[in-house]
Amino acid sequence: MLKKTNLADSLRKVSEPEKSTKSVISPDGEPLSNNSSPGVAPSRQGKKAIAGHFDPAVSKQLKQLALSQDTTVQALLSEALNDLFSKYGQKPIA
């Protein structure tokens, strides 16, 4: 006969996040804790989102450009930001 499990214990185990000992290193060599941002991909830890509101046609054209250039929207935005920084005499760091 199977042993019945306690529902409260099962719920507690599910609700408690697992402690991970893995560490992620940022581009500047600083360790980032996996526990600091649960649900965030390691490639996004230590990063900030930059957003703007544009006409839907802008979004569509940007996606089409990324597809035609066989790249990503992220890469195109990085290129555009670096061009903008250079235009204003700033170091291209995007």
Image (tube, rainbow, N blue to C red):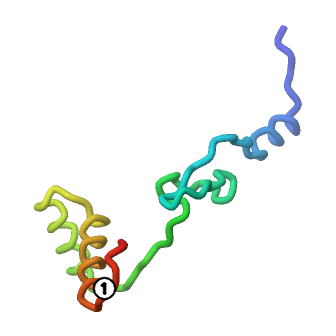
* Residue 12: percent from left, percent from top: 83, 42
In the image, residue 53 sits, relative to residue 60, either above or below, namely below
Image coords of residue 11 (percent x, y): 80, 41
Q: Quadrant of the N terminus?
A: top right
Between 85 and 62, the one nearer to me in the picture: 85
Disc 1 crowd rating (10 Å Cα; few below 14, some 14-19, many 20+) is few
Identify residue type, mark 1.
Phe
Q: Quadrant of residue 29?
A: bottom right
The residue depicted at 74 percent of the width and 42 percent of the height is 19
Residue with the mark numbered 1 = 54
Residue 9 image offset from top left, x and y in percent: 87, 36
Which residue is located at x 33 percent, y 85 percent?
A: 90
Residue sitting at x 34%, y 80%:
91
- In this rendering, the answer to whether 48 lies above or below 84 is above
Query: Observer-nearest residue: 94 or 1?
Result: 94
Instruction: Name the image quarter holding the C terminus.
Output: bottom left
Left or right relative to 24: residue 20: right
